[in-house]
Image (tube, coloured by chain):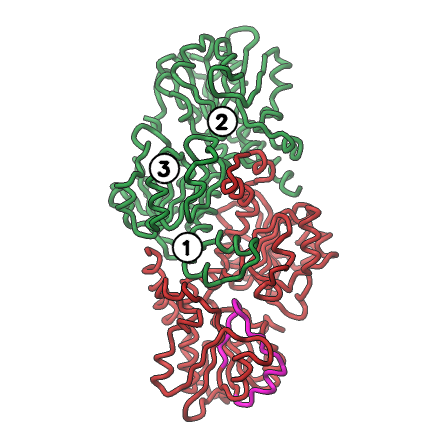
Chain colours: A green, B red
Amino acid sequence: MAMKRAAASAVRAITSSGNSSPSSVLVRHLHASPGSKKIVGVFYKANEYASMNPNFLGCVENALGIREWLESQGHQYIVTPDKDGPDSELEKHMSDLHVLITTPFHPAYVTAERIKKAKNLQLLLTAGIGSDHIDLKAAADAGLTVAEVTGSNVVSVAEDELMRILILVRNFLPGYHQVINGDWNVAAIAHRAYDLEGKTVGTVGAGRIGRLLLQRLKPFNCNLLYHDRIKMDHELESQIGAKFEEDLDAMLPKCDIIVINTPLTEKTKGMFDKNMIAKLKKGVLIVNNARGAIMDTQAVVDACSSGHIAGYSGDVWYPQPAPKDHPWRYMPNQAMTPHISGTTIDAQVRYAAGVKDMLDRYFKGEDFPTQHYIVKDGELASQYR
Amino acid sequence: MAMKRAAASAVRAITSSGNSSPSSVLVRHLHASPGSKKIVGVFYKANEYASMNPNFLGCVENALGIREWLESQGHQYIVTPDKDGPDSELEKHMSDLHVLITTPFHPAYVTAERIKKAKNLQLLLTAGIGSDHIDLKAAADAGLTVAEVTGSNVVSVAEDELMRILILVRNFLPGYHQVINGDWNVAAIAHRAYDLEGKTVGTVGAGRIGRLLLQRLKPFNCNLLYHDRIKMDHELESQIGAKFEEDLDAMLPKCDIIVINTPLTEKTKGMFDKNMIAKLKKGVLIVNNARGAIMDTQAVVDACSSGHIAGYSGDVWYPQPAPKDHPWRYMPNQAMTPHISGTTIDAQVRYAAGVKDMLDRYFKGEDFPTQHYIVKDGELASQYR
């Protein structure tokens, strides 16, 4: 495959781009005590797909490609997809593991109860971005460190968001359905197919992913808006070409297309409910690759059914995996996928390298790159507060 | 619908951007002889969709929105979707029409035979871009003028191409199928999902659409290549960030993704045959919104089946409408639609305005904007030679 070679070079980029760790004088919570560590990784199972691509690292079978490296240093490395309930494989190891590696794509819910049970646990690593499957307050209270591979898949997610914007604006899926059903009816597609050019696109949140999206949107000649806790500095803002909207309630009704780029927190949970959606433009398109629980599930279904939301696309659900009867599977004008945008082959190569780098620093008692910390010294990173 | 308002402003943009006609001293072939003209338009039928959007102008029912204007000036305006064969509505009018308006989306094939029959025919207007459904040599020999609304939907097509690149690179459709089938298997998608970043994208042809695509690709940090008859000037090339490849055969094997942006001519017809495809990278992705007949139909099917082509997406077929048994409907890893990319609502508003402007100039005996001519004074425009 042509793509495999291109992806391979990504690993060099990420390993050389991490901030170099300062020789810090701060107390280090992460001195690895001498001797063997028990490391548990929870990933999705790839079955027959595991061997189809040598860079398919983020699955149970390939286990981030770090087994040999870990075992050669005398550590124990257990990998499983079995994460839910008291009889799960993960549960069995909670009492004596030192490090737990999880992903947002197949989230192992690390509850306060599990944290209480995990007497040896020191480090929770997220292979990817988004650690809301962990009870971060409980982790902070227990003195644990939580870290993500910040940056590892921001490009992957931003690209995917732009794809979804185009799929909705241009009304791609009805045309595809015609093709596979043997039909041809241009009018049935065209009457609600538009150009992206000239439309108003607003992002709720303009962190790393939101900014990368805005940069990619710039040549499309849209009217770009962003809401965030922090206004970008003037130079970056004019380079990106987006207008800051301090008041979210003022921004949302202006948007033809809304993209959710905010983490799931107590504040954002369920924020797109019936009342909020009623304030949006009739015919609005929504892209959400952030977290499913930011939306009120039924409110989205109702608005897609009434046409108030003219299209909804994203790869995040609550819970995950989405059950067979999740109503978003069957609502009109959806362009959904399973949680995939951050786990492209390129992203896997990068977050596998990022996890390995943090484990190496952990064993050596070194700090991680600052931007990777989600919980450190009992404090949550600002975006999760 | 939020989008309708945004589209409406497009008409102002196009009507003000047309080149002003120089007071030419050239012989004009297009003096409208005094009196009523018979104008025939061939469009797709929209049925129940025609009334769903006031800007849905490019269908039989809404007839470019120029009926009242034409009839108020005493012209006859006949509109039909019935275009094929000796008993078709179009055939009946060939003998005495003065102007024929067609579109690439529902192409009326204007053969040498039909041209011979059309004794009063002076002007062939394409509502959109791409006039290969007209026998251009026969039109030139008969002294006819052929013109397109150049620029009317180049943005529409370029946006659509970028959407298709992302759909293929990121392996969108298998994920969507899982959703509607009640499944959840991230591995089955992820093992062949990639970022666009870092990949090599080559466009065969870098005219208006190809350049707009390259501009939109720039922030994705790809390796951009283009092949064209003409090298861009240095400033444009460095602004777009693409490298000129004089030798097509040298460019194609370098590409992870190939986009076809060349008109259908005698030279390009069937150029992607078995031999050409064999030279491409294994796992190449191909996007073709240009013309279906540039590809050898069966060679594409075979290469998609073997995996040599890892994904094929486009909206153009041969013939159109694609019959129910067209093999591209059923080949693996296709992301096809009916011919739709250039007929978004925004594009319709622009090409309807462009056709009206050219008819107005025709009635007044004025030249068209130069870039609109495909055949003038017995000469083909350079891209069709």
Q: Secondary structure at mark 2?
A: loop
How far apart, in angstroms, are the residues tagged by discs 3 and 2?
A: 23 Å
Disc 1 target residue:
A196
Mark 2 and mark 1 in contact? Answer it, CB < 8 Å. no
| Residue at x-position 62% and y-position 26% | A62
How far apart, in angstroms, are the residues tagged by discs 2 and 1?
A: 33 Å
Q: Which mark is residue A165?
A: none
The tag earlier along the polypeptide, 3 or 2, is 2
Amino acid type at mark 1? Leu
Disc 3 target residue:
A297
Closer to us: B265 or A216: B265
Q: Position of residue A93 (x, y in %)?
A: 52, 12
Whether residue B384 sits left or right of residue B352 in the image: it is right
Mark 1: few/some/many CA within 10 Å (<14, 14-19, 20+): many
The tag earlier along the polypeptide, 2 or 1, is 2
Q: Secondary structure at mark 3?
A: helix
Q: Which mark is residue A103?
A: 2
